[in-house]
Amino acid sequence: MLSSPEAIRYVLVTQAHLFKPTYPKSKEKLIGPSALFFHHGDYHTKMRKLFQPSFSQNVIRNLIPQIEAIATSALDSISGGKVVNTFYEMKKFTFEVAVLSIFGHLDTSYKEMLKKNYNVLDKGYNSFSIKLPGFSYTKSVMARRRLGKILCEIIEEKRENRVDEKDLLGRLINFKDHENGQLLTDDLIADNVIGVLFAAQDTTASLLTWILKYLHDDSKLLQAVKEEQKAIFEANVGGELGLTRAQTRNMPLTDRVGQKPNTFMPFGNGVHACPGNEVAKLEILILIHHLVNKYRWEVVESRNGVQCNPYPIPWRGLPAKFWKAP
Ligand code: HEM
């Protein structure tokens, strides 16, 4: 077990080949055994090459208006003054953005089916993996089967309609192995799509929940973020996109005061480093921008605890009330 950032960096960057990513079989089955993060070596390298361009700044900048629409609709839907579970609401937001970044445009009916079944899968993901009727794990396995079918339908439809290559699904569908001329199978594509939904949802939602908590607890920080946000948002989202530089300098997520250089690795490092980091930073920037400028919120949970599920999140998902700024 390693704890110093320097040692972790050394292993991730130069010794990763000595470690094989291993997950319990029950979890591998729920996501899909071909998902990127279960792998290592040639298959992993090939798939990463396919993934990376779809999550690059050049491609995701085209998603900005749609991410803004998702953010404002998510915030509007919770700003009636009723107590909501912030983490749960942020999960809905990050799921929608993940779907957008994978599929580009997707019919509402397919989106709803994916959401419904993925939620069932998600609920049983960390439950005891016993396959008896009525148990969460069994429900998850069944939802995974349905998700596989829905995804195969979407893939078939897109294959027939000759999809746009830029989004991840399009790239996976159009990929032809130059060594043997083979296409990726529908099952392999489905595993990877579910893998991205999984990698994208709770990570980003838990971070957003923490940001909301810290902004709520510290009015000076909120004021500073409001001012910084205006400048970053106008410079990046309103104008040209140069997120990495602006964000590593400014966002609370990447506040590196007192940290040794090159040891801050929220997105990992080396061959498995997060390919979706630009998507995550963009959606966080957009949601926080709208939140601090147009909404107000009040945390109703007095306990300052941490809950692990398994990512650390504020106690009980940070119950809070939201409303539109007057
Ligand atoms: C704040 C949000 C996020 C954080 C903190 C985060 C963090 C990470 C970390 C640390 C890893 C490396 C894990 C390892 O070394 O095994 C990773 C991998 C990954 N992330 Fe993210 N991530 C976030 C959001 C996203 C989003 C939005 C997407 C997709 C749109 C995404 C897709 C992936 C994928 C596919 C992998 C597997 C990469 C591989 O194994 O080669 N992540 N993420």
Image (cartoon, rainbow, N blue to C red):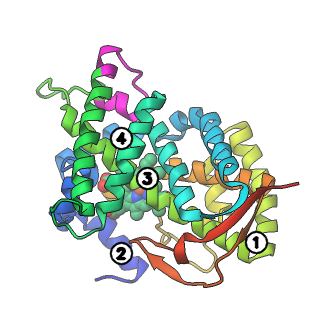
**Residues marked 1 and 2 touching at CB (< 8 Å):** no
Q: Position of residue 256 (x, y in %)?
A: 60, 72
**What's the distance in space between the residues labelled 2 and 3, CA to CA?**
22 Å
**Residue furthest out toward the right:** 326
The residue located at (24%, 39%) in the rendering is 148
Q: Which residue is mark 2?
A: 8
**Other-residue count near label 4 (Cα within 10 Å), few / some / many at <14 / 14–19 / ≥20:** many
Q: Nearer the viewer, residue 135 or 4?
A: 135
Q: Secondary structure at mark 2?
A: helix
Depth check, front residue: 23 or 42: 23
Q: Is residue 238 above or below residue 205?
A: above
Q: CA distance from mark 3 to mark 4?
A: 13 Å
Q: Amino acid at mark 4?
A: Phe
Determine which of the numbered discs, if any, sits on residue 200 in the image. 3
User: Which image quarter has ligand 1?
Assistant: bottom left
Name the residue nearer the viewer: 301 or 13: 301
**Residue bearing the label numbered 1:** 221
Q: Secondary structure at mark 3?
A: helix
Tell me the magenta residue range.
157-172
Residue closer to the observer: 204 or 177: 204
Of mark 3 and mark 1, the one earlier in the sequence is 3
Q: Residue at x 73, y 48 (%)?
A: 233
The mark closer to the camera, 2 or 3, is: 3
CA–CA distance in space, label 3 to label 1:
26 Å
Query: What amino acid is labelled 1 in the image?
Result: Leu
Q: Position of residue 280 (x, y in %)?
A: 52, 52
The quadrant in which the C terminus is found is bottom right
